[in-house]
Image (cartoon, rainbow, N blue to C red):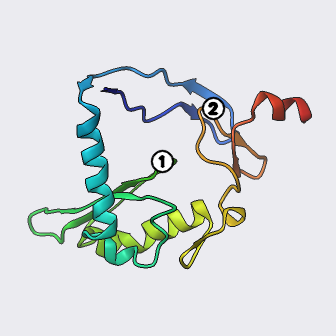
Amino acid sequence: MLYEPRIGKAIVDPDGNVVKKIKPKVQAKLDLPKSVLTYIDDALKGVSRQGTMAWRLNGFPLDEVEIRSKTGSAEVYGKQSTSWVASYTDDYVVVMMVSQGGTGSGTNGPAIRAIYEALYGVEGDQVKPAKAAIPGVVAGNGLPVFAEDGAILPPVTERKAAKR
């Protein structure tokens, strides 16, 4: 299985105009068996369930919103450690780093959890899709639409565009 990550789609100015579309450029290809990718994915789910991120996700509905996490800290001589958490679900990626923040989950865990709660409409241990940041919408392939007030809205599909 070849895995080719993409980190950006476009550069957009403050008025919502596309300045430049970013064409994916393959830097390298990893020819990994699906079993290896599945193993890594399952291991990262374990970090959220019983590993270093678990204490920050206690009571979170991980059976409905499967968060994969990797926590860590980076040492800089003479300073407190830099705290970081990289995480993802089937729909979103959330990465947070705090310079001189200490431990990964200790510093970033509450904010990472709050972001996923907002994205998916989580209240306590319940997922309430109607309360999600953009109800019924997950990250798509198209570019978002920018409202006049600066709000970021989901991409317009051809069907939606015809109704506007």
Q: In the image, is residue 78 above or below residue 29?
A: below
Residue shown at 82% from the left, 35% from the top: 160
- Residue 127 in which image quadrant: bottom right
Give the percent coordinates (x, y) of residue 110: 42, 74
Q: Secondary structure at mark 1?
A: loop
User: If you read the primary sequence from the N terminus, does the residue marked by circle 1 or circle 2 appear first?
Assistant: 1
Q: Amino acid at mark 2?
A: Gly
At horizontal 58% and vertical 60% (from top left) the residue drawn is: 119
In the rendered structure, find residue 142 and report the number of the disc placed on it: 2
In the displayed structure image, the side of residue 9 where residue 49 appears, left or right: left
Residue at image location 13% in from the left, 63% down from the top: 75
The kind of residue on which mark 1 rests is Asp
**x, y percentage for residue 137?**
67, 49
Disc 1 to disc 2, C-alpha distance: 17 Å
Residue drawn at 31 percent across, 26 percent down: 1
- Name the residue beneath numbered marker 1: 90
**72 with respect to 131 (left or right):** left
Name the foreground residue: 124 vs 95: 124
Does residue 19 appear left or right of residue 46 in this picture? right
